Image (cartoon, rainbow, N blue to C red):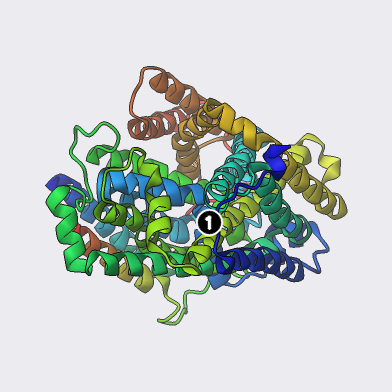
């Protein structure tokens, strides 16, 4: 099942790379968004929590 | 007449009964109050684009979890363990994040009321009507199934007659959905999701306490069922092989559901800004992280606490309610069942009304695209949808095959649908005709694979690849849309 876990982490990593690689003005209407409202940070945190869950299970 | 009036003499604690009645009356009054002031089709179908992200996010969770999910997911966890949570984690969260960043901005900025309407702008009216027909048929049949499954629960545990339960829950949800449209649906969903979480957290807490604490619970579980805390199952598992979960569920079925499902996405189109629409999906993804603790954990708790093996795994949630919860909390959990039903039914009715009014009647008879007609037609279609759901409920139960057939067709549809949506946004190459060919060709391909007994998760992945091939192959030989009309609909176009 190690391949399943590796695939899962690769999916998470791919999403993190994509959302941080794509220019901010392509993701938001207002590129001057505050840190708190920058959804990339929240999405990354969420995927980090997911990674922990898949380490536990 | 027994169907409507024969109340079984099941002892229900007065506190539980009072909670249920209080909820039904309260949500009806609250829904009517929230939904007042609907004056235009835009108010009715997309809440006048006034919804804040938190309401939309909670509503997404409510629309996603039906009462049958409670029972089914607990039963699934009883059988296969925590692997059932993949439907909420790897099978939802990555797709929700992708949807928030790469799909929702295009949908919201296009100013559409529905996903088929977006497909109509990106491809053609033929693609719009085809997708609206399949999705509407599925959503209307879903209403019957939702009503029936909840009525069975209420009959078993409260002794209410099936017909009476269907009528009461249907009428309560119908009145505020018909009068208040999306705003009433979304705001009542937030209350319903709150109730669902409180009820389920109470159940989880008491269940774990009764097991002797978290460590004792995991020890007891893994000593008898060593694989029940493994998120992935072996590659030769008949239903959920890990590669099927990754390729079929994570790559295709889940993105297809989260990025193209009208019932889910309609409330995001009613968000008050693009950011609110995106943030709502991220908030819903956060909620999905917790959902397995609400709907999967009860199945695992039953496995530890029940003295003998249950004949039917779907009995696991009812078992734990009956044996673990004290009066008051069991009433709250019944209320959360009804809330889960209502938050799914109201969203389903509202989205079906939108698609039938605008994407089928509006395309068929363009002269009906007037605000007053759309508002009135939306209300009528919602009412008709509810009546059909109430009438179909016992039929869907008797002929379960009908529902499974339609659900299967929808799964066949998801790979092709996701393909044309994904590449329609990412690239300007797909043409109106190649979009239609990819949609219909992919559907036929899926049906053929289904005929040969291929696993559903693998069908989703291969039909997605096949549709993508058709989409680009035929885009070389068919007429593209003018570049100007694609600017706001595709990645790389003007903002």
Q: Mark 1 points at which residue?
A: B337
- Please tell me in which quadrant of the rendered image residue B435 appears: top right
The answer to whether residue B434 shows anywhere in this view is: no
Residue occupying image coordinates x 45% and y 56% = B99
**Relative to residue A35, is residue B118 drawn left or right?**
right
Q: Quadrant of the C terminus of chain B?
A: bottom right
Percent x, y of residue A43: 36, 67
User: Looking at the picture, does residue B329 appear above or below residue B140?
Assistant: below
The answer to whether residue B222 shows anywhere in this view is: yes
Percent x, y of residue B452: 36, 17
Percent x, y of residue B469: 40, 30
- Please tell me in which quadrant of the rendered image residue B397 appears: top right
**Relative to residue B50, is residue B327 drawn left or right?**
left
Residue occupying image coordinates x 41% and y 18% = B451
Number of marks: 1
**Relative to residue A43, is residue B280 drawn left or right?**
right
The local crowd at label 1, few if under 14, some if 14 to 19, many if 20 or more residues have their Cα within 10 Å, is: many
B211 or B147, nearer to the observer: B211
**Regarding mark 1 in the picture, which secondary structure is present there?**
helix
Q: In which quarter of the image is the N terminus of chain B?
A: top right
User: Looking at the picture, does residue B258 appear above or below residue B179?
Assistant: above
Percent x, y of residue B487: 57, 53
B405 or B75, nearer to the observer: B75
Q: For mark 1, name the chain.
A: B
Residue occupying image coordinates x 81% and y 40% = B366
A43 or B21, nearer to the observer: B21
**Relative to residue B477, is residue B135 drawn left or right?**
right
User: Looking at the picture, does residue B71 appear above or below residue B479?
Assistant: below
- Please tell me in which quadrant of the rendered image residue A42 appears: bottom left
């Amino acid at each position: 099942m190690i391949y399943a876990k590796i695939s899962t982490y690769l999916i998470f990593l791919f999403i993190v790379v994509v959302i941080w690689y794509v220019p901010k003005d392509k993701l938001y209407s207002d590129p001057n968004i505050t840190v708190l409202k920058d959804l990339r940070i929240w999405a990354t945190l969420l995927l980090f929590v997911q990674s922990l869950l898949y380490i536990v299970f | 007449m027994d169907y409507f009036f024969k109340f079984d003499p099941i002892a229900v604690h007065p506190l539980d009964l009072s909670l249920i009645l209080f909820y039904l009356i309260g949500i009806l009054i609250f829904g009517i109050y929230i939904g007042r002031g609907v004056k235009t089709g835009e108010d009715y179908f997309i809440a006048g684009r006034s919804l804040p992200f938190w309401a939309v996010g909670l509503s997404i969770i409510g629309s996603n979890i039906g009462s049958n999910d409670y029972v089914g997911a607990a039963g699934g966890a009883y059988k296969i363990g925590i692997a059932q949570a993949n439907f909420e984690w790897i099978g939802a969260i990555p797709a929700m994040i992708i949807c928030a960043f790469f799909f929702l901005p295009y949908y919201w900025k296009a100013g559409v009321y529905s996903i088929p309407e977006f497909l109509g702008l990106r491809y053609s009216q033929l693609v719009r009507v085809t997708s609206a027909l399949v999705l509407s048929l599925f959503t209307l049949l879903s209403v019957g199934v939702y009503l029936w499954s909840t009525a069975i629960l209420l009959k078993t545990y409260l002794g209410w007659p099936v017909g009476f339960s269907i009528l009461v829950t249907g009428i309560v949800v119908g009145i505020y959905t018909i009068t208040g449209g999306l705003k009433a649906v979304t705001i009542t969903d937030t209350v319903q999701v709150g109730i669902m979480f409180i009820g389920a957290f109470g159940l989880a807490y008491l269940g774990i306490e009764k097991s002797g604490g978290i460590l004792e619970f995991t020890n007891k579980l893994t000593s008898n069922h060593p694989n029940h805390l493994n998120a992935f199952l072996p590659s030769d598992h008949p239903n959920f092989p890990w590669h099927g979960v990754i390729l079929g569920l994570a790559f295709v079925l889940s993105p297809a559901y989260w990025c193209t499902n009208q019932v889910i996405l309609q409330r995001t189109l009613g968000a008050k800004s693009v950011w609110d629409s995106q943030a709502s999906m991220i908030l819903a993804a956060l909620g999905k992280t917790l959902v397995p603790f609400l709907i999967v954990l009860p199945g695992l708790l039953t496995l530890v606490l029940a003295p003998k093996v249950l004949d039917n795994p779907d009995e696991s949630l009812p078992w734990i309610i009956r044996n673990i919860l004290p009066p008051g909390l069991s009433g709250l959990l019944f209320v959360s069942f009804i809330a889960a039903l209502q938050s799914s039914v109201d969203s389903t009715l509202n989205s079906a009304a939108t698609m039938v009014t605008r994407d089928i009647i509006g395309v068929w008879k363009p002269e009906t695209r007037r605000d007053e007609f759309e508002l009135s037609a939306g209300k009528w279609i919602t009412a008709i949808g509810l009546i059909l759901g109430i009438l179909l409920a016992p039929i869907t139960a008797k002929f379960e095959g009908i529902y499974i057939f339609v659900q299967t067709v929808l799964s066949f549809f998801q790979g092709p649908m996701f393909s044309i949506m994904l590449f329609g946004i990412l690239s300007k190459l797909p043409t109106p005709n190649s979009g239609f060919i990819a949609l219909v060709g992919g559907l036929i391909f899926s049906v053929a694979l289904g005929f040969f007994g291929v696993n559903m998760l693998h069908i989703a992945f291969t039909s997605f690849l096949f549709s993508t091939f058709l989409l680009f192959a035929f885009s070389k030989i068919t007429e593209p849309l003018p570049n100007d009309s694609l600017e706001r609909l595709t990645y790389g176009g003007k903002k």
